[in-house]
Amino acid sequence: MSGQLWYLKACRLFESCTPEQLRRLEANSRVKNVSKGSPVYLPADEADSVLVLASGRIKICHLTGDGKQSILAFIEPGEIFGELAILNVGNRDEYAEAVEDARVVAISGDALCQLMEEHQGLCLGITKIIGVRRQRIERRVKHLLYLSNRERICHLLLELAEQYGRDTVRGLEITLRLSHQDLASLVGSTRETVTVVLGQLQSEGLIELGRRKVILKAPDRLAHQVGAPPIQTKEASPQQSPSNVYLRHSFGS
């Protein structure tokens, strides 16, 4: 079995495709390796392919007018990204960068559109991805407009804990390793502000901080403070299978 076909079969989105349909996608796809810190694509690149992450981790980012980085999404193995290529949008307006060494399968947008025309389930699945990502971006914009820095950071920690939380004897650990600058780029704040707020939360006994590590000591109390519902975790694992991660982990496209 070729590399492309194996990775496509491992993606939940394509699990109901027939062998012949998968072979067609394979014939119109290619695998590329991307080293840590290197771009997968850049703003203004032609949006002619949809990508599946086979291994590693990718972040989707946008550069603000003053050159600051805003992180829109983290992409995990088994997820697709760059899916707006199927809408013939022309050029991309964000960029994707490898957070760690990654392997990516690039699928021709035209080939995927053709398959969507004959596969209702695939069409519905991609529509859901686009819808969920838009919903999360809209929610983040509302938080940016109406919530304080502390409230935005608390909401982010709760969201990350729900997606990447692992129960430990010390509390609910967020297994996704993020720097204070990463957190700032996710909530539209500064590293200094994030550091101050995290320090306050730790002093209040709500979280525990380590090197690129956050443990929620009292997640229910944290959620109550910002009017969020109690979080429902699904324990994350470095070898997590690509089930519904493409819906749960996506912040942007």
Image (spheres, grey):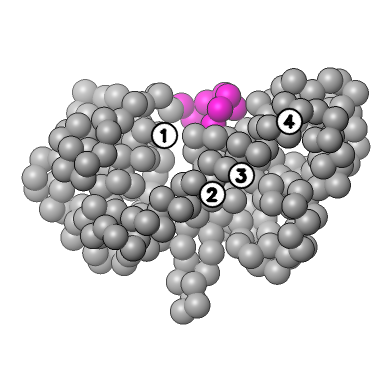
The quarter of the image holding the N terminus is: top right
Expressed as whole percent of the image width and height from the top left, the position of residue 190 reads 31, 67
Query: Percent x, y for residue 185?
Result: 40, 60
Q: Secondary structure at mark 1?
A: helix
Q: 176 or 157: nearer the eye?
A: 157
- Between marks 1 and 4, how big is the CA–CA gap? 24 Å
Mark 3 or mark 1: which is in front? 3
Residue 134: give its label.
2
Q: Residues within 10 Å of mark 3 (few under 14, many from 20)?
A: some
Q: Amino acid at mark 4?
A: Leu
Foreground mark, 2 or 1, reads 2
Tell me the residue that label 4 is attached to.
122
Provide the residue span drawn in magenta: 237-245
Q: Which residue is mark 3?
A: 130
Question: Mark 2 and mark 3: span between their CA atoms?
Answer: 6 Å
Q: Left or right: 65 with respect to 227?
A: right
User: Could you tell which of marks 2 and 1 lies nearer the N-terminus?
Assistant: 2
Please give the residue where the numbered disc 1 appears in the rendered image.
163
